[in-house]
Image: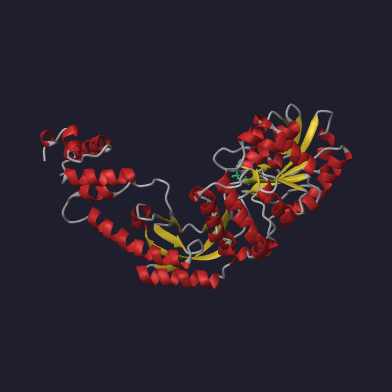
Amino acid sequence: MELRDLPSVDELASEAGDPLAVDAARVVIDRAREEIQAGADPGDLAARLREELADARRPRLQRVLNATGVVVHTNLGRAPLAEEAVERVAEAARGYSNLEYDLVEGARGSRQDHVAAILRRLTSGEAALVVNNNAAAVLLALAALAEGREVVVSRGELIEIGDGFRIPDVLARSGARLVEIGTTNRTRAADYERAIGPETAVILRVHQSNFRVVGFEERPRLEEVAAVARKHGLPVVDDLGSGHVSPSNTVLLGQKEPTARESLAAGADLVCFSGDKLLGGPQAGIVLGRAELVERLRRHPLQRALRIDKLSLAALEGTLLLHLETPERIPVLRTLGQATTAVRERAERLAAATGGEVEETVGRVGGGALPLAELPSFACALEESLAAPLRAGEPPVVGVVRDGRLLLDCLTLTDEEAEEAAGLVAVAREHRRDEHGEDGNPGQGRADARS
Ligand SMILES: *Cc1c(COP(=O)(O)O)cnc(C)c1O
């Protein structure tokens, strides 16, 4: 085909009789022009238009198979929900609900009431408030308790969580003023004591989440910080980051990640943490602690802007109910709790089905929790050239490229997903063959590779 043989956008589009056809035809013709200029044959334009139209209607937010070995992977949507939580979401989504309606009184109620009692039971907190995410919880706590006044934070805790969420920036947005104390590696209780003045409103503790200072390092225990705060009549707000409510996690990982209950018992007046990290629920920010402080957050004008939506609330309630009785049904906890032999067997099955090799790997919790925890794991190692076609699969499979090979880590795949992945590897090899096929038609593979 020569450039002059290309139909016009309108000519190509008119054959399809589809409202999206003009945009799709433009894409197809532009691409065909490039290919002709590169000396290739663009092939059947009508067929490519049909593919383009199908692609335009394909949902962009889609399920993927997480073969990265990172359990709480922020880029891959963090925590998968338990089946029970998904059912709660579907029910709340399908019809009306008593979201803010008190069925006993027949009058307006609060969306917060649905999860407050169970959160209190799980953590011994006096009162609870749930917002859109933990970043919102920190912002709201500082705005409500420290606007126009000072917040004392250790330099060792002025962290960036990822995607530019930095504690000093959040603090500035809340209208509070940051007072930094100590150094990156050492902060003592006396540093807090010295920084407190008439303008001090809050002492903020931030979980170091995604990093650790090792070596010449010192941080006062929460009990000591709380003692200083009490002496001056100040509240301690403890941002736990991931946080969690099940003591079983600590056992599972053999490493310390503070629970909300422990932080409150150690003297924090408010704790906040994420709903979709180790808790294993939906995106949410959970605030727990002294009723009088929680009430100040609830009444702050920002609360309305940061509130949790009903679908997340339904998922959160479903997840919290499982924490009470059957936490092993929560996918994040199940993944963390599985036996390494089960992971190895899964990797062996996947390797046998795909002609790959079993390789020992190290999984991570992710989501800023337990950055040093190394989860023993096994992967199926395949040729690196499969990485891109697997990402274009239906569903996409996301693995890790290392040392010229693609590792499909089986820690974060269920047995069913590993089986599904084996089928997707076969499809990806087919595609790769098409793309580098002997027909010398590079356009073919490109047309169905989704960008
Ligand atoms: C993850 C994290 C946050 C942010 O939580 P989101 O739920 O992602 O908004 C805040 N503080 C700490 C310490 C964290 O680890």
Rendered image coloring scheme: secondary structure
Q: Image check: 43 left or right of 246?
A: left
Is 432 rendered above or below residue 377? Answer: above
- Quarter of the picture holding the C terminus: top left
**Residue at point 32%, 43% (across, down):** 56
Residue 53 lies in quadrant: top left
- The answer, for residue 371, to whether it is visible in the render is no
Give the quadrant of ligand 1: top right
Q: Where is residue 347 in the image (x, y as percent from the top left)?
A: 45, 69
**Residue at point 41%, 64% (across, down):** 381
Q: Position of residue 199 (x, y in %)?
A: 81, 28
Q: Position of residue 371 (x, y in %)?
A: 61, 53
Q: Image check: 294 left or right of 134?
A: right
Is 36 rendered above or below residue 69? Answer: above
**Residue at point 24%, 34% (across, down):** 22
Q: Image check: 256 left or right of 431?
A: right
- The answer, for residue 131, to whether it is visible in the render is yes
Q: Position of residue 1 (x, y in %)?
A: 11, 41
**Along the line of sight, which residue is nearer the eye, 35 or 138?**
138
